[in-house]
Amino acid sequence: MPVFPSVEWFQTAADLLNKSDSFKRLGTCDAEVGVQVDDKFFEVDFEAFEVKGAKEIDAHRAEELDFVLVQPYDAWKAMIQDIQVNGRATHDFTLNSLDLQSAEEFARSKDYHRRDAFYRFNQTFQEYFDTAAKFETTFAQ
């Protein structure tokens, strides 16, 4: 059971998305995506028709990515639990909803053109997180 947040958790989600037909339905996706959980940073690389991999990174590398999805641990946990209970993110827990409801930007980048990848490939990123419904997660806290 992968622990959230960890490289193993993000890689498990990547492996499941790569085995699905999502890229065939949604098309290619090219983005270097960051995920910030409190003071931890992870990078998930989407290239063409696959997720190339996931790794833990530092804050400096996160600034170089297309965008970083930023929420505190408790918000990430609530999102993943919603996905696990419902089979996919619902209502307030979709990436779009989190972005629209956030007082601060959810998808952050110094370069607005690069941040646009969040909106262009949003459904692919949503399917990536929705794979959490297909595996058990242990939460770090």
Image (cartoon, rainbow, N blue to C red):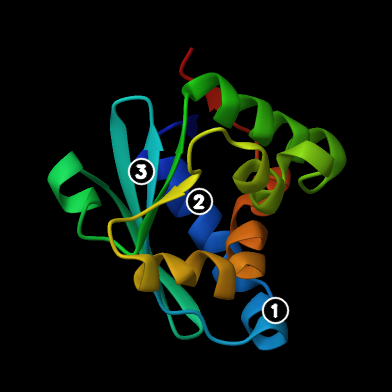
Query: Which residue carries the number 1 mark?
Result: 21
What residue appears at the point 40 percent right and 43 percent down from the top-left corner? 8
Marks 2 and 3: in contact by CB < 8 Å? no
Amino acid type, mark 1: Asp
Q: Nearer the viewer, residue 84 or 34?
A: 34
Q: Which mark is residue 108?
A: none
Image location (x, y in percent) of residue 58: 17, 41
Q: Nearer the viewer, residue 28 or 95?
A: 95
Image location (x, y in percent) of residue 25: 72, 84
Amino acid type, mark 3: Val
What residue appears at the point 48 percent right and 77 percent down from the top-left corner? 50
Neighbours of disc 2 within 10 Å: few (<14), some (14-19), many (20+): many
Marks 1 and 2: in contact by CB < 8 Å? no
What residue appears at the point 67 percent right and 34 percent down from the top-left corner? 79
What residue appears at the point 50 percent right and 43 percent down from the top-left corner? 106
Marks 2/1: CA distance?
A: 16 Å
Image location (x, y in percent) of residue 76: 56, 31
In this rendering, position of residue 92 left or right of residue 70: right
Query: Which residue carries the number 3 mark?
Result: 7
The answer to whether one can see residue 58 in this image is no
Marks 3/1: CA distance?
A: 23 Å
Query: Which residue carries the number 2 mark?
Result: 12
In this rendering, position of residue 128 left or right of residue 90: left
**Quadrant, the N terminus:** top right
**SS at badge 1:** loop
Marks 3/2: CA distance?
A: 8 Å
Q: Residue furthest left?
A: 60
Neighbours of disc 1 within 10 Å: few (<14), some (14-19), many (20+): few
Neighbours of disc 3 within 10 Å: few (<14), some (14-19), many (20+): many
**SS at badge 2:** helix
